[in-house]
Amino acid sequence: MERFENVSVVKRANVYFDGKCVSHTVILADGTRKSVGVIFPSRLTFNTAAPEIMELNAGRCRIKLAGESEWRTFSGGEQFSVPGNSSFDIETLETLDYVCHFGTP
């Protein structure tokens, strides 16, 4: 999907890790919440409450889910899933343009 139709956008940006990750919350007509943003080259740890799917539009990163020992590499056009009540380490090798789909296993 190239764009979201009939949405509300929260005007205030979500700024994390001293500006290394910046996103906006998008709320679809059915109440589904997504986050659309960028992560600049860095190495960060994110905690999750609900399951998420990270859809990568552009860029390149390595991720390691909680409890895993191996890093996996992903690029624009790919996605990865993160369980709820967990965390993941991410190393962005190129600025990452992403959509985070919340509550999706």
Image (cartoon, rainbow, N blue to C red):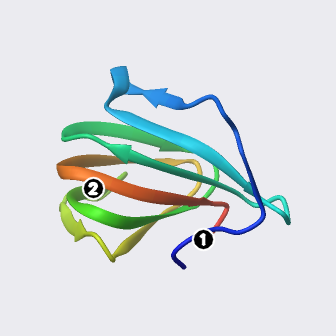
Q: In which quarter of the image is the N terminus?
A: bottom right
Q: Is mark 1 on a helix, strand or loop?
A: loop
Q: Position of residue 78 (x, y in %)?
A: 33, 76
Drawn side of residue 47 relative to residue 72, left or right = right
Q: Position of residue 77 (x, y in %)?
A: 33, 77
Near mark 2 (Cα within 10 A), the count class, few <14, some 14-19 or many ≥20, is some
Residue 54's mark? none
Residue 105's mark? 1
Q: Quadrant of the C terminus?
A: bottom right
Query: Residue visible at 26% across and 57% down?
Result: 63
Residue lying furthest right: 30
- Residues at circles 2 and 1 in contact by the CB criterion of under 8 Å: no
Name the residue nearer the viewer: 13 or 66: 13
Residue type at mark 2 is: Lys
Residue type at mark 1 is: Pro
Residue lying furthest top: 18
- Vertical side of 86 occupied by 14: above or below: above
**Separation of disc 2 and disc 1 at Cα?**
17 Å
Drawn side of residue 75 relative to residue 83, left or right = left
- Vertical side of 11 occupied by 1: above or below: below
Q: Where is residue 24 in the image (x, y as percent from the top left)?
A: 57, 42
Residue lying furthest left: 93
Query: Residue visible at 52% across and 52% down?
Result: 36
Near mark 1 (Cα within 10 A), the count class, few <14, some 14-19 or many ≥20, is few
Q: Is mark 2 on a helix, strand or loop?
A: strand
Query: Residue visible at 21% across and 38% down?
Result: 43
In primary-sequence order, the first of circles 2 and 1 is: 2
Residue 64's mark? 2
Name the residue nearer the viewer: 85 or 103: 103
Q: Position of residue 11 (x, y in %)?
A: 66, 33
| Count of number-bearing discs | 2
